[in-house]
């Protein structure tokens, strides 16, 4: 999840690349020089960005969110997503290396497929009901019994996940 999706305002001096840069720096999942290189920046470029009030404010906000324990589940999801994304190039290198054996390439390809399902999960059937039995007693007369059966909820195959 990018900072843009968390509500960071990327107007003006900030853009999607700046937002991604901020999260990578805050997450500290790679050495800072590697992060800068990945973004085509130098330490001097970063020093210039650190003079921009919007960049500094977004960095502080990202750092606060990263360290926050208000929503642990969301924080874990963000961190795991960043770590997964950071490992994509490593997996690609396994697949593209000619000297790598076929079993490792196949496993790496499977891992990429699983990661794509993490980001774009396939729709699944909804929960199944357990069934029920309801009896209504109507005084001295015979009661009424309703017997409910388990119904499987399904999502139509034509439904496109957007």
Image (cartoon, helix red, strand yellow):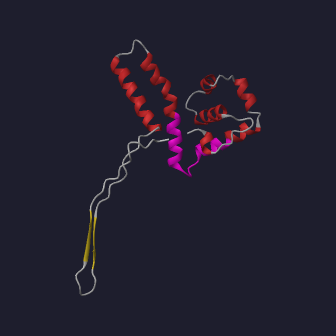
- Picture residue at 45% right of the left edge, 24% below the top: 91
Question: What percent of the width, then of the height, locates residue 128?
Answer: 32, 55
Question: What percent of the width, then of the height, locates residue 81?
Answer: 51, 37
Q: Quadrant of the N terminus?
A: top right
Q: Is residue 55 magenta?
A: no
Tell me which segment is drawn in magenta.
Answer: 60-82
Q: Is residue 77 magenta?
A: yes
Looking at the image, residue 73 sits to the left or right of residue 19; the answer is: left
Q: Which is nearer the eye, 7 or 149?
A: 149
Question: What percent of the width, then of the height, locates residue 156?
Answer: 38, 46
Q: Which is nearer the eye, 116 or 94?
A: 116
Looking at the image, residue 107 sits to the left or right of residue 5; the answer is: left
For the image shown, how many numbered marks are present on the structure?
A: 0
Looking at the image, residue 133 sits to the left or right of residue 60; the answer is: left
Look at the picture and state if 82 lies above or below 71. Answer: above
Name the outermost residue toward the top.
99
């Amino acid at each position: 999840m990018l900072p843009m999706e968390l509500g960071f305002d990327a107007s003006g001096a900030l853009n999607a690349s700046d937002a991604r840069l901020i999260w990578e720096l805050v997450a500290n999942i790679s050495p800072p020089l590697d992060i800068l290189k990945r973004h085509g920046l130098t330490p001097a470029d970063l020093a210039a960005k650190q003079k921009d009030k919007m960049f500094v404010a977004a960095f502080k906000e990202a750092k606060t969110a990263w360290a926050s324990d208000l929503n642990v589940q969301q924080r874990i999801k963000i961190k795991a997503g960043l770590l997964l994304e950071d490992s994509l190039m490593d997996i690609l290198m396994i697949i593209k290396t000619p000297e790598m054996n076929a079993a490792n390439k196949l496993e790496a390809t499977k891992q990429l497929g699983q990661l794509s399902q993490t980001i774009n999960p396939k729709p699944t059937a909804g929960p199944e009901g357990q069934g029920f039995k309801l009896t209504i007693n109507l005084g001295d007369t015979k009661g009424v019994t309703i017997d409910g059966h388990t119904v499987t909820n399904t999502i139509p195959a034509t439904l496109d996940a957007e």
